[in-house]
Amino acid sequence: MYAIVEAGGKQHRVEVGQRVAVERIWAGAEVGSEVTFERVLLVRDDSKVRVGKPLVEGAVVKGTLLRALRGEKIIVFHKKKRKGQRKTTGHRQDLFEVRIDAIEA
């Protein structure tokens, strides 16, 4: 059984017991707390597939917040041609590592 959930503007394919890194969308959440993904786009059981239009009604994915972490550094480079203007900056996204505990459909 698996589900496709939307979190932080991205879609993730999740299964029970899987660990997934999602953007920090739960304000004030602490390590060890239970979180829910309410935007479930698809649920697949052993026998059937339920596709939402756009969401599957009554479907919820529950998980446990394991830790807060940061993604890899992304280099952002801006340049204006023929002007000698250049600017380099970096970005690291704040993430949560979540263990998927249950898929309720």
Image (cartoon, grey):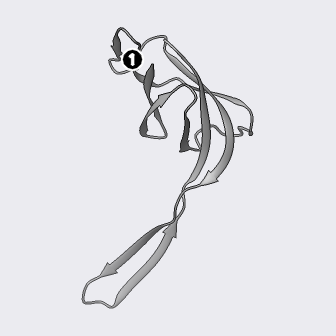
- Residue 104 lies left or right of residue 77; in this view the side is right
Q: Where is residue 38 drawn, in percent x and y?
A: 52, 23
Q: Where is residue 28 drawn, in percent x and y?
A: 71, 40
Q: Residue at x 67, y 36 (%)?
A: 65
Amino acid beneath label 1: Arg
Q: Quadrant of residue 75?
A: bottom left
User: Dot 1: within a 10 Å radius of its alpha carbon, few (fewer than 14), some, or many (20 or more) residues?
Assistant: some
Q: Quadrant of residue 85?
A: bottom left
Q: Quadrant of residue 71?
A: bottom right
- Residue 105 lies left or right of residue 95; in this view the side is left
Residue matched to label 1: 44
Q: Is residue 87 above or below residue 71?
A: below
Q: Where is residue 84 drawn, in percent x and y?
A: 33, 91
Q: Residue at x 54, y 45 (%)?
A: 23
Q: Is residue 24 above or below residue 50?
A: below
Q: Is residue 18 above or below residue 59?
A: below
